[in-house]
Amino acid sequence: MSKSLKDDPLWYKKAVFYEVFSRGFYDSNNDGFGDLNGVTAKLDYLAWLGIDCIWLLPFYGSPMKDGGYDIADFENVDPSYGTEGDLIDLIDKAHSLGIRVISDLVMNHSSDQHPWFLESRSSKDNPKADWYIWRDDDSMYKGARIIFTDAENSNWAWDHVRQQYYWHRFYSHQPDLNYDNQEVKDAMLAAVKKWLDLGLDGFRLDAVPYLFQEENTNCENLPATHDFLKLLRKEIDSRYPNRVLLAEINQWPADLVDYFGNDDECHMCFHFPLMPRMFMAIRREQRLPITEILSLTPDIPNNSQWGLFLRNHDELTLEQVSDEERDYMFSEYAKDSRMKRHMGIARRLAPLVDNSRSIAELLYALLFSLPGSPILYYGDEIMMGDNIYLKDRDSVRTPMQWTPDRNGGFSLANFEQLYLPPLMDSVYGYPAVNVESQFKNPGSFLLWIKKLISVRSNYEVFGTGKIEVLHDDNPSVFAFVRFFENEMNPETQTENDSRIEVGRMEGEDPVSVNKVLCVYNLSRFPQPAELDLSKHKGAKLVELNGRVIFPMVTDGSYRLTLGPHGYYWFEISDQI
Ligand code: BGC
């Protein structure tokens, strides 16, 4: 049964997101490229899985030299993805199934094939001469780092037509737009309105820390950038209710939180520093990397939310770790140098964890219970593999594996026509790993993750509750309580605190759940845990998956035994 779209301005705090690379999802017209109609065709699958919001990678006009992040037409659908009508169909059908749809908004740069750039480069005095950042020499903004260090050696590129340098933070075929020019801002806001008018529920804001430049700074996180994002938010809020801005800000926590503003900038930001530390914690079998970064993460405004992810369409970025930690990550997770891309590791989740089901489950359970909304990457729900022999980040963008049939059920085109070859190896290839087989297999990862999504969705406290990390002398044990504020601190209770009545086992009366205890064993061996639950004396613990009742919390210290990579989610119930 499908959910309906609720009129809820805070929907994104309770949502499970799913990232779709339309090119690789499903090819509806068998030309070898996945398309928007292909996503529409698979919406029933996504509704069945239980996700709440799809994030579509860019589908705009593009020469596709950077997966569509090199945009040559901000206001039209690239014909290889379909038509505007196809997008409207996708959004309408998704909405009818209770699923929202957001898409990438790439404001920082365009393709060098964009007509704006072609005009801008044509002379020094054309009407768009100032739409990009041109200089006679490459001496300015030396404090700005190079992001794609393995592909570019300067943020300036020489243009032989205009006989000047232009500024670019990413590939040199992606010139940065000049946001000091009001016309550029207006053009981008026009594109924003166009897509929102068609019904999109918001945007993933690509690469926003770099919108403005200023001499003698690192050209990131500048006040002018925040002002522009606040303006964007205001424009959206004034006309389009219940939309979300999910920002890609690959920065340290203290800089990241500024992008929430005072609940007047971005609704959500990806927690970039947390992501690699989850992988570090698993390999070190210790909670420290996670607890450390959580303690360095400032509180965020009430209506703001973290976007949590394990993997996405990019490399596992190691920009927000120390040099030593980066070396450690490379030595543990990129044993073959072909796995390294830019400043990170272009691998999917399953190969990163050596295809270990128990580690994958542990990581997802963490992702679904830490403060924030989880964002899944297409294919990771069946533990798809990658192909490190493909260039750039194509390694993690191979066709979705739907069935054991030709081309993994992705397309009926000839194999040679496909945008990328599907995986065919004996471990991760589509004959072994695909949706159809896992759908039929009650013990599959797919059915496990579907259950995880439904459990999380039933307990609003995972989305909107606070966190208290519990100390345990055992460094391999990570435990915390998610709670609604007034439960732990009665004096702070307010009338507006959210509460949810959740339907639990069929036939059971809904019971409000305000406190959940999560306990993880990060090691590959069984581990004892001794938790200080003195604040919850007299409560009983009810395991959330099977609703099994565990012994009551009698005194302060509560003992548990966890299997290798095991975990528990308990409701802390005061009703005895
Ligand atoms: C996207 C990348 C892209 C880059 C440049 C990002 O942050 O996620 O895939 O290469 O922006 O557009």
Image: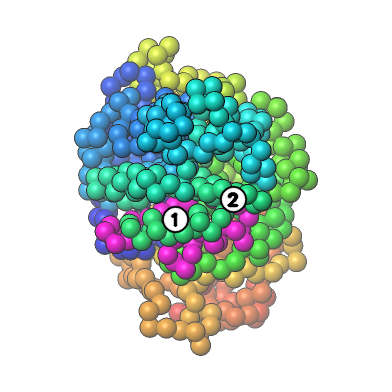
The residue under the point 47% across, 51% down is 247
Pick whichever, 482 or 265, lies toward us: 265
Amino acid beneath label 1: Phe
The residue under the point 29% across, 48% down is 193
Residue 366, percent across and down?
Answer: 56, 54
Pick whichever, 457 or 279, lies toward us: 279
Quarter of the figure with residue 14: bottom left
Pointer 2 residue: 214
N-terminal of the pair, mark 1 or mark 2, is: 2
Point out the stretch of residues depicted in magenta: 237-265
SS of the residue under disc 1? helix
Give the CA distance from mark 1 to mark 2.
15 Å
Residue 219, percent across and down?
Answer: 60, 49
Pick whichever, 36 or 182, lies toward us: 182
Amino acid beneath label 2: Glu
Neighbor class of circle 1 (other Cα within 10 Å; few <14, some 14-19, many 20+) is some
Pointer 1 residue: 228
Residue 455, percent across and down?
Answer: 43, 57
